[in-house]
Image: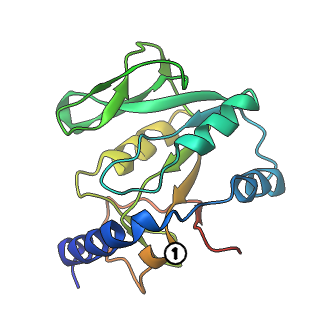
Amino acid sequence: MNKSEIRKKILKIRKKKSSKNLKINFENIIEILKKNKITYKLIGGYYPYNHEFNVIKILEKFEKKKYQISLPKINKNFQMNFFQWSKNEPLVINKYGIPEPISEKVIYPDILLVPLLAFDSRLYRIGYGGGYYDRYIKKIKQKKNITTIGLAYSFQKIKAVPINKHDIKLDFVITNKIK
């Protein structure tokens, strides 16, 4: 199967199963951070779209633990940056229908929570095909160390993601299934 076929298949399954209220345990993320001695407090999240795992409650828990939260904004030339956000701040809808922060304060996250459509055991992912996260991760890794954590439902795992030279491997993937 090519990436386009995988996207269609997983989107259909995710739409059907997302209403089942599956959750990712926040403590599993904290455990990975502690185990790998990741103590940084700048976290990049995302606003859930198209039946993605709802990461907002996790971001709120990070905020309570004094992490600085940021969400992406799409820029020109198919680029994105992360901007400061708090659960009490309003969001605006971008041209793709995805909420973005109104803040103009750019944040370079230390920890990036990454949405995905599919992933494999090698920690490669398939997104929507725009390459936004791959480009962003490549760009930010030239400036600093960053830990990337994909968040997914367990049914999004596939045997092998077809990869090319632009695909960036994640550091971790956490699902709703207990490890």
Number of numbered markers? 1
Asked whether residue 56 is in view, the answer is yes
* Residue under pointer 1: 154
Residue drawn at x 41%, y 40% is: 47
What amino acid is at disc 1? Ser
Q: Nearer the viewer, residue 116 or 15?
A: 15
- Along the horizontal axis of the image, is 133 left or right of 95? right
Residue drawn at x 54%, y 44% is: 112
Q: Nearer the viewer, residue 9 or 166?
A: 9
- Along the horizontal axis of the image, is 73 left or right of 23? left
Q: Is residue 115 above or below residue 46?
A: below
Q: Position of residue 107 (x, y in %)?
A: 52, 24
Residue drawn at x 41%, y 82% is: 158
Q: Position of residue 7 (x, y in %)?
A: 25, 70
SS for tag 1? helix
Q: Position of residue 127 (x, y in %)?
A: 32, 59
- Along the horizontal axis of the image, is 124 left or right of 112? left
Q: Nearer the viewer, residue 28 or 163?
A: 28
Asked whether residue 111 is in view, the answer is no
Q: Position of residue 133 (x, y in %)?
A: 37, 47
Question: Which residue is situated farthest in the top direction here?
Answer: 104
Q: Quadrant of the N terminus?
A: bottom left
Residue drawn at x 40%, y 12% is: 104
Q: Is residue 113 above or below residue 164?
A: above
